[in-house]
Amino acid sequence: MPVFVEDPAQFSKPRLKSELIAHNVTLPAVESKKQVYVELYLKHIVQKSAADFSSDEEDDDVVEVQDSQDFEEEKDPKMLDPSVLTDDELKTTLLKYGVEAGPIVATTRSIYERKLQRLLKPAQPWQNGGTGDADQYSDSEGDEESVSQGSPETVSLMEENLHVDMRFESRIPLSSSGPEIKRGNNRSSNQGPCPRPYWQEAATVDKYTMTNRSLFITPKTSLFKRQIKEPVTDVLMEMFPETEPTPTGIAATRRRPIKGAAGRPVQFKYPDLPASPMTLQRWAVEHRLVPLWVQILVFFIVACLLYLIYAAMEDSLANPFVTLLDNLSMETETEGLSLQAEP
Amino acid sequence: MSSTSQKHKEFVAEPMGEKPVNALAGIGEVLGRRLEEKGFDKAYVVLGQFLVLKKDEELFRDWLKDSCGANVKQQGDCYGCLREWCDSFL
């Protein structure tokens, strides 16, 4: 997905204008169609790059490289300052670096800007870090060249990495990348001397350039993602220090498949769970704050107490029944008395 | 994962509802307060940010660091917590 061919036709008209101005090319009439600008761009800017190259080759790749290099150089002022970009431009720029940006909203904007800045200033530190690999693919061109060539390649590979995967999730072993890099290098060397000096220039002159999203390294070769951790601290290792390095050197955290809660009930994962709301409700029904037997016991104790109190009251306890009995007996007695009294 | 905290387990066990932002793993009092000052007063708002960043780890960590000054461990805890929550409930 990395874009090698910076197709001027994709530029906006103002951008083309500004780039033409930067190259001291007279602008066409104001109402000119974009195509005119594109042609002018191609013509002049390509020519200018050719002059830099001091080569008489004009095959497409070279042209495209020059284009891309120039384009990148021209674009740099704008890219350097992501805050100038509109939301959409920021998003498309990030996309060019292979970053699938989410919605650029107020809260996310600064994050994406920072990310873009990070993508923009990749070269220097990584070049220094990548010299070890330069030996792998230096091509009997002298140390100077090979180092700077190696490092742009390293950088471009890094950038390919970033292109494809910003999440350091899958990486390919360095060993497999070695031969492929060599292959890429051979291809590049086949292109002739032109690109190399330019790379040197680019590497030294403009450290802000994304050196090359070099065409000499095709998407195929770039598919192997080198470890991003080399130049920068490995965040992954930092996060999971206890993981052993795998043979591929990757400590990828596998994303768990997205399943519903039913597919992977949490209870199995965390056996010592605190209660979920449902279980809490169930428990509330089943359990009381105080155990049941204690409640019953207390009930009986209180009942006994009340009975005793009631009994302690002298007349009240037997009152209803005793008085009734008394009344009855009194009645019978009175009757008896009255009966006796009357004979 | 034995390295997850109790807070993590509790958070991941159920829908977050109206839980405060302190309930997130890795977010304690200080960080929680800072987040609240920025308007992220509930866990679901942070979840919203997480989702808007497309659940990307690096971006979310950046954002956390930027908005409340979380360190690497706290970032990781919070990210892991939210990610697992999403895996189960989203």
Image (cartoon, rainbow, N blue to C red):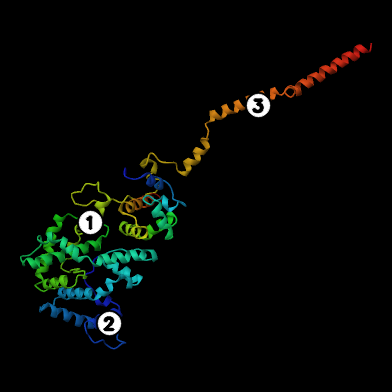
If the image is split into quadrants, where does the N terminus of chain A sit?
Answer: bottom left
Residue A145 visible at all = yes
Q: CA distance from mark 3 to mark 2?
A: 101 Å
Residue A258 appears anywhere in the view: no
Q: Crowding near pointer 2: few (<14 within 10 Å), some, many (20+)?
A: many
x then y, percent, for residue A286: 51, 35
Discs 3 and 2 share one subunit: yes
Which numbered disc covers residue B73? none
Count the marks: 3
At which x and y percent is residue A85?
32, 72
Q: For the residue marked with disc 2, what is the amino acid? A: Lys
Confirm whether circles 2 and 1 share one chain: yes
Q: Nearer the viewer, residue A336 or A91?
A: A336
Who is closer to the viewer here, B16 or A2? B16
Inter-mark Cα distance, 3 to 1: 78 Å
At mark 2, the secondary structure is helix
The numbered mark at residue A233 is 1
Q: Which residue is mark 3?
A: A306
Q: Residue at x 16, y 60 (%)?
A: A129
Where is A249 relative to A59, above or below?
above
Q: Earlier in the sequence, mark 3 or mark 1?
A: 1
Q: Amino acid at mark 1?
A: Thr
Question: Mark 2 or mark 1, which has the lower sequence index?
Answer: 2
Asked if marks 3 and 2 touch (Cβ < 8 Å), the reply is: no
Q: Position of residue A48 (x, y in %)?
A: 17, 81
The residue beneath circle 2 is A17
Towards the viewer: A86 or A188? A86
Disc 1 element: loop
Letter of the chain that mark 1 sits on in the rendering: A
